Amino acid sequence: MGKKSDFSIAVILLVVMIPLFFFMVKNMDWTIGQDHEWNQGREEDQQKDQDKNGGSEENKEDQTDGKDKDKGEDKNKADENQNKEKIIWGVDSASRTTEELYVCVNEQFGEPKIWGRYLGSKEDVSQGMSKEEVNYLHEQGTKILPIYNHFSKAEGYDHGIELAEHAISLAQEIGLPKEKVIFADIEPDYPVDAKFIQGWYDGIKKSPYHPGIYGIFAEEQPLFEVYEQAVKDKKELGEQMIIWSAHPQLEVTAKEKAPEYQPNGPKGSLILGWQYGIDAKECNIDTNLFKDEIMKYLW
């Protein structure tokens, strides 16, 4: 009887435990499933919140990088445009600027903002500008760059002083305002030395005007070497003398096809002008580029 009772008890327990076991398993699966669904729903809600607020941190960084890149590109474009605006196209001519010549330049090359002209006439070389010509160019909104060329030798300090005084008298005769530049035209076949450059500088500096030099500032030219020597002996000359370089020589172009501003000259010199093309077949002019810094020195 004891064995039968034990067996009966075991059967009863088994009958009770089996349903309980299945109930627990079912309940466990349901709990896990609920947790999984709840977590999945939570992740979906977080994703929606991120999308609403502009995306994940990585997306935000990508968006920030993209914005910074766009800003950088915009700044570069602005800098390029600004640099382009700082370079001004102009011409110079040995003959007087008549209405016919001005129209020719505008039609064949473009509108010049600067026009180089000579102080006083030099026989068989250049015609000096007249007051009527000055008025006409000013009416067109064109600045005048004054050039002095009444010499064929650029040697000696006293000679530099003498020529500076002559240039000043011609400038005053035509009515050149104060603080405007006068360029000494040193041609490549002229003998030149550092003393002349110093004399020209000192002579013009004593006047109301500002000194400048035009020439072919190629390293193989004597002008390049003697200018460096003049600056070595007189540091302020290099800081204040305006250089209008005619090197390198390229070709005459229209305004829209002008090259990048890349004149040659002594290191550290104040190069504000570049005559890059000479002897145009049409209109009898040379073509130039200038830094806009020169504008305050022009008439």
Image: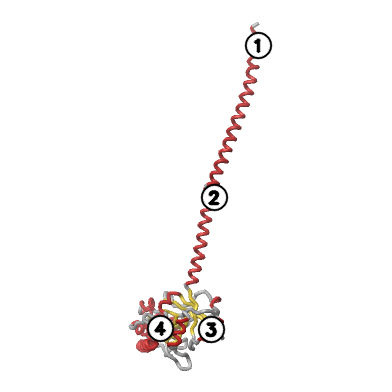
Instruction: Write down the residue under mark 3.
Output: 103
In the picture as drawn, the residue positioned furthest to the top comes out as: 1
Mark closer to the chain start, 4 or 3:
3
Kindly tell me whether residue 8 is visible in this rendering.
Answer: yes
Q: In the drawing, what numbered circle is on residue 8? A: 1
**Nearer to me, 127 or 183:** 127
Quadrant of the rendering where the N terminus is positioned: top right
> In front: mark 1 or mark 3?
3
Q: Position of residue 115 (x, y in %)?
A: 47, 82
Q: Residue at x 50, y 59 (%)?
A: 71
Q: Residue at x 42, y 90 (%)?
A: 120
Q: Which residue is mark 4?
A: 182
State the CA–CA distance, disc 3 to disc 2: 59 Å
Question: Which residue is located at x 50 percent, y 57 percent?
Answer: 68
- Residue placed furthest toward the left: 206
Marks 3 and 2 in Cβ contact (< 8 Å): no
Gap in angstroms between the C-alphas marked 4 and 3: 26 Å
Q: CA distance from mark 2 to mark 4?
A: 61 Å
Of helix, strand and loop, which one carries label 2? helix
- Up/down of 125 relative to 54, above or below: below
